[in-house]
Image (cartoon, grey):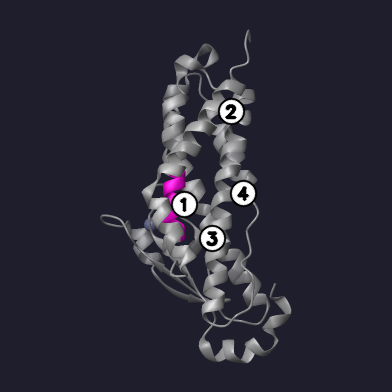
Amino acid sequence: MATDIVPELLEAIERDFNNAISKSKRLKSIRAMIENGTATYQQANEYAVEIGEILARTFEMHIKSDVLPDGKMYYNIAERILDPTLKNNHVIVAKVSAEIQEQLNKSVGLGLRGIEPPVNQLRIDSIINRVVAEEVFDDVAWILQEPIVNFTQTTVDDTIKANVEFQGESGLNPLIMRSAHGSPPCEWCRSMQGIYKYPDVPDDVYRRHDRCRCVVEYYPGDSEEIRRQNVWSKEWSG
Ligand SMILES: [Zn+2]
């Protein structure tokens, strides 16, 4: 390869991504809700969709066959562009989700901090492997669209899962509610609707297909249990 296109390409992507984020009214209004303590996981999910869509649009603007050597997405380009940008989406959304979780905990008198889930490296690797598999990047460009949004939403669902399991292992029985959205939502999504109580939470509750806009929400353990647990929950606060 004559010239390494990655440094300049990555810089342009990061610049436009950050610009779009700072201009987003949707993100701004969600941040205001977090600040005044009214945000729920519905807002976390909206935040993730917006962050995912912004990154997908930025990719669409900058990554095309005609800027890539031989029109192909080589592994060493994909890895150096997608790994940091997808990790960054995870970090942004994990922070917001954990913040909302902590507020939900507080709203019922639980002094538990919100836990941030680890990044799902397997999913990043699988996105990278899918875009490098084709000879012509434009044939797989769609992978850097909706699957990027889906990846970013996963951080929210992983945050719920991490906190539900942590609280469950601590003796609480948190509730998870999944509601179907979409026009109309698919049969699978409709079948997953409902309220689940820890530990009876199938893994599928946290799963979503591309373009799924279902909302998965967390409710702290039922009030009686919370009152009982609250006496000693202070051990974990901080
Ligand atoms: Zn769905």
Q: Residues within 10 Å of mark 2 (few under 14, many from 20)?
A: some
Q: Residues within 10 Å of mark 1 (few under 14, many from 20)?
A: many
Badge 3 marks a residue whose secondary structure is helix
For the residues marked 2 and 3, what is the alpha-carbon distance in whole angstroms?
28 Å
Badge 4 marks a residue whose secondary structure is loop
Q: Nearer the viewer, residue 214 or 81?
A: 81
Mark sitting on residue 78 = 2
Q: Residues within 10 Å of mark 4 (few under 14, many from 20)?
A: some
For the residues marked 3 and 4, what is the alpha-carbon distance in whole angstroms?
15 Å
For the residues marked 3 and 1, what is the alpha-carbon distance in whole angstroms?
9 Å
Residue range of the region highlighted in magenta in the rendering: 44-52
Q: Nearer the viewer, residue 86 or 123?
A: 86
Total of numbered circles in the picture? Answer: 4
Q: Earlier in the sequence, mark 2 or mark 4?
A: 2
Q: Residue at the location (58% across, 90% down)?
A: 227
Q: Earlier in the sequence, mark 1 or mark 4?
A: 1
Q: Earlier in the sequence, mark 3 or mark 4?
A: 3
Q: Nearer the viewer, residue 192 or 237?
A: 237
Q: Residue at the location (44% across, 53% down)?
A: 47
Badge 1 marks a residue whose secondary structure is helix
Q: Residue at the location (43% across, 70% down)?
A: 38
Q: Nearer the viewer, residue 132 or 29?
A: 29
Look at the image and say whether residue 113 sits in the magenta stretch.
Answer: no
Badge 2 marks a residue whose secondary structure is helix
* Rendered image quadrant of residue 73: top right
Q: Amino acid at mark 2?
A: Ala
For the residues marked 2 and 1, what is the alpha-carbon distance in whole angstroms?
22 Å
Mark sitting on residue 97 = 3
Pointer 4: what residue? 120
